[in-house]
Image (cartoon, rainbow, N blue to C red):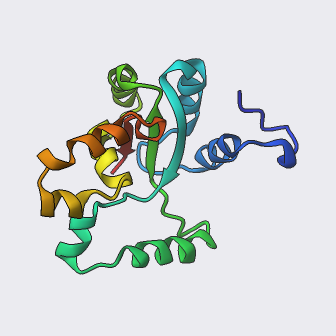
Amino acid sequence: MYNPDQPLRTATTQDLWTALLLKRSFNNFEPEPIVQDLYAQPQLWRKFWLGWLVFEVDFYQKTNEAPIARLLEMLVYAGDDRLYKNDVLYIQSRNDDAVAPLLDLAKQWQVDDCEVYDRTRLAILLGRLETLIEVLGEEKMTRQIAQWKDRECCSPIIAMWWD
C-alpha cells in the first residue's frame, strides 16, 4: 500500500508512479478515487503508470512522425510542471479476467475513452513480430505469438484518457 510519508529511498517504483498520479489534475481526471479503488483491489492489477498515448509502429509509418520525436517531447515537457503532458493512465491487469472489472472502474472514474492491449496485440508489439508476420504470414508465426502471449509481461494493458 502506498505510504506518502515513507522515505524516498524505500519507495518502490509503483510508489513513485502513485505519487505522480496523485499530483496530476486535468479535465475530469480525479486521482484520489483511482488510487483508492486500485489499492482496494490489488487482485486486479500488476502495475499502473501515467504516460503519453503510445502509438503502434504503423501510425508512425503513416504519419512520418518518428517515435523518438515523442520521447524527446516527453523529456522536454518533463522539466516543466505546467507543460507536463502525461495524461494517459495505463493499468496492466493481473490477468485476462481482471480486464472487465477494470473497465467497470473506468466508467466510475469518468474516463472518456479506453483502449485495451490484449495478449495477442502485446505479444506482437513486444516480440517485435510485425515485420515477420507481414513477410511470413500470421499462420507461420503462430508458435512465436503463443510463446509471447504466455509471458507475464503480456498481461492485458488498458490505456485510459480523459479529454
Judged left or right of residue 150, residue 17 is right
Residue depicted at x 33% and y 51%: 163
Residue depicted at x 40% and y 22%: 98
In-front residue for pair 89/122: 122
The location of residue 130, given as percent across then percent down, is 23, 59
The location of residue 124, given as percent across then percent down, is 29, 50
The location of residue 103, given as percent across then percent down, is 34, 28
- The picture quadrant where one finds residue 38 is top right
- The picture quadrant where one finds residue 77 is bottom right
Residue depicted at x 29% and y 45%: 144
- The picture quadrant where one finds residue 58 is bottom left
Is residue 83 shown above or below 125?
below
| Image quarter in which the N terminus is found | top right
Is residue 68 shown above or below 56?
below
Is residue 110 shown above or below 76?
above
Residue depicted at x 35% and y 39%: 147
Can see residue 1?
yes
